[in-house]
Structure formats: structure tokens, C-alpha cells
Amino acid sequence: MQIQADTPQLLADAKNSILFTAVRPELVMERGDGIVLWDTAGNHYLDFIGGWAVTCLGHSHPVIREALVRQSSSLVNASPSFYNKPMIEFARLLTEISCFDRVFFASSGAEANEGAIKLARKHGAVNLGGAYEIITTVNSFHGRTLATMSATGKKQWEKLYEPKLPGFRHVPLNDMEAILAAINPNTCAIMLELVQGEGGVHAVDAEYLHALRQICDARGIMLIFDEIQTGIGRTGKLFAYEHYGVQADAMTLGKGIGGGFPLSALLVKEAFNLFEAGDQGGTYSGQPLAMAVGLAVVNEVINRQLPLNAEIQGQYMMKRLQNAALQYPITNIRGKGLLLAFDLEDRTAHEVVAACLGNGLLINAPNPSTIRLMPPLIVTEADSDQMMELLCRSLDQVDTFRK
Ligand SMILES: *Cc1c(COP(=O)(O)O)cnc(C)c1O
């Protein structure tokens, strides 16, 4: 591997040419393999961010390369106005492995959720006398388009880009009274994550979810699961709804479904096959390269039983964290499968993340008090052992943890 001498120049160019939207560390990522990333200065990092819960097969997996080479040699883009073979095969696979009957493809999670929001409004218009309100939860995350930001229940976004899209009500998660009070004749859908990811890894209660299903059935309200972060094996089952035995009317997938390639999907039950020609679309809907990659990635996840590995490795990591909690003030260890989190005292999460980066470990802080772990689904016990060692070393370095 050639080590580049020009990292400072690259960083200078980045600062002069890339629109500022985020504070990023002073490094440039260049290469990935399995659970490890390398930067242009030759440093390597154990990746427990996993491309933001995306790289389910790890970095640079050969099935992705092979799918891209194979598909790009025959058809890159036929236009969204035609069917193509990988699109049909992939849609068939997704309907076979889930409880849903039909699929609309897009490129990002937000776009899949936009499709779900439009479908909910269509359902309201067609079946509920014009009802258009969608109930979502406080601390939820549904994306960064204006509609999905309006759906998102993130306090810091309340005043951003006003006026938001009207028609969303936010209720606290797992609060039955609050959602009963919010439901009204104008309600067309309830949309929620089964484990809030960006909100800090908080799972929906089974009893609450079963009750929501009954209310939705009784009232004709559409129930939508945003499984963009929880789907494709992340929580220890192929889809998180399998933990609960509750089915939605529609579900959105993103992140892991492409293993790093931009891809998302909206899956619906036949009763919600409601769009008319022209109601919904997109230039890259069903794009052959994305379809070939998605098909290869999901098949690999299933064939290698990665949801099971997520379950087993998640439990192992949970045990290691509980052990560490005897020595370090880490609390509220929680999560399902390989979507785990714990809390830190004194809002030190960002400091801990920075210390970890310095020690060659990538972890994420969804808020100043929480650390979230979302490694590739191929993670091993040895990887977790190494992660714990680097994490504890980093905790030792952060001031408040010094004894
Ligand atoms: C990441 C995420 C989204 C948005 O996906 P993008 O691909 O960033 O548009 C939506 N919902 C959930 C639950 C997510 O985790």
C-alpha cells in the first residue's frame, strides 16, 4: 500500500472545495477491508461505525465488486420507464423473505420514507376521506429531506428550515395515552422505528406495538415501520419486526440493504398497492447497478446467516460491556443484535469518540451522553475484544474517567 505524502494538501483542498455541513476529523479515508479502514497517512481504524450501520458485509466485499463488474458489463441504466432483470429478481427476493408483497426502489433512506409518506397520504385521500396526518415519535429519525425532517422528532431540528411540512404529530415512544390522544379522524398513518437508532438506541415495547397494530386495524390507519437502520440483520433477525411478531402495512429499508451502495426500498402489503401511474417515481428507481448489488448483498447476508451472527456477537459485546461497567461509569447498556449503546456520565461521549479515533477505533456518539456501536455484521469475538481494549484505553485517557 502506497502511503501518500499529500494528506495536508488533500485536507486543504477539502476545506476549500467541499460545502461545509459537518465538522470532520483531520484525515482522509482511502481504503477499507473487512472491519478495518485505512487513511491516506497509513493509519488504520477498527470500524465499529460500519459506514453508519451500512457496511453489513464489511468494507470492499467481493460480492459487491463482482455484482458491479458483472452488471456494468451488460446494463448500467435502461431508464426507470423499463423493467430490468436484476430489479425483478431483487423485488421477488424481498417479497419472499419478508411479509410484504410489493417493492418500490430508491437510492436513500429519506427517499424511501418520502415514498411511505406519500403512500400514507394517498391512503388517506382514497380510503379515509382525505385524512393526511402522520403520527411519529419524539427522538425519531426519518431522514433529511424536508418532509422526512418534518416527520423526524429531533428537538434540535424543530426550528430549522421553517416552515416545515404540515401534517406530522410527534408523541413520546411507548406512551399509550399520548398516542391515543394524538389519533384523530385526520390520522392516516403511524410511522416509527422499532429501535430508534439516531435517537440513541431505544426499542419499542412489544405490548405497545401490538396495541398500535390493533388500533390501526380498527381505524383503517396505516402502520409504517422505518427499518432503514434495523433491517437486513442488524438486530439479530433479518427484520426487527420479527422480534415482535407484528407486521406493518409498509416498511422502509436502506443502509444495510446496499452494503455501502446507495440503495433503499419501500415494501408494502398488497392492500396498499395504491399509487396510480405517475404518482411516484425517480430517475434511479430500480437502477440496474443498485439492483445487482442489493441482490448480491442480501443473498450473502442470508446465505452466511449474518442475522444469527449479529445476535451472537451482540450478546458477547453486551457481556463485555457489562463487565467493563464494573470498572467504568458506563450505564444503561442496551440494544438488540449489533445495534448497541450505553450512556456515559458528564456528557463526555464526544471526548470519548475523539480519544477512540486517536487509538484507532471508530465509534459513534448519537448524543453527548451516549455511545453507539454498529459494526459490520461479520464482526467476530476477536474484533470485539480488540474494540473493548481500545475503548477502555480511551476511557482511561478522558479526564473525567481518570481515577
Ligand atoms: C439513516 C436513517 C434514515 C435516512 O436514511 P438516508 O439514507 O440517510 O436518507 C431514515 N431512517 C432511519 C431510521 C435511519 O437510520
Image (spheres, grey):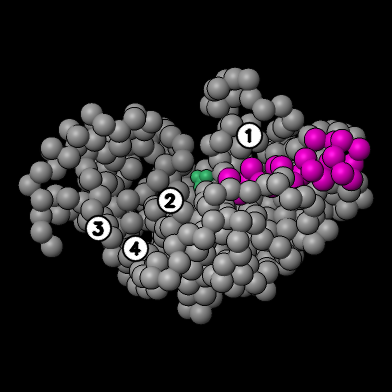
User: Could you tell me which residue is drawn at 75 percent across and 37 percent down?
Assistant: 134
Q: Nearer the viewer, mark 2 or mark 1?
A: 1
Dot 4 alpha-carbon crowd within 10 angstroms: few under 14, some 14 to 19, many 20 or more? many
The stretch drawn in magenta includes residue 223: no
Q: Is residue 76 left or right of residue 361?
A: right
Seen from the viewer's position, the closer of residues 385 and 144 is 144
- Give amino acid for label 3: Arg
Q: List x then y, in percent, for residue 357.
A: 27, 46
State the residue position of label 4: 59
Note whether residue 196 is visible. Answer: no
Identify the element where label 3 is drawn: strand
Q: List x then y, in percent, for residue 378.
A: 41, 69
Dot 2 alpha-carbon crowd within 10 angstroms: few under 14, some 14 to 19, many 20 or more? some
State the residue position of label 1: 147
Q: Residues in magenta?
A: 111-132
Q: Which of marks 1 and 4 is in front?
A: 1
Q: In which quarter of the image is residue 8?
A: top left
State the residue position of label 3: 31
- Give amino acid for label 1: Ala
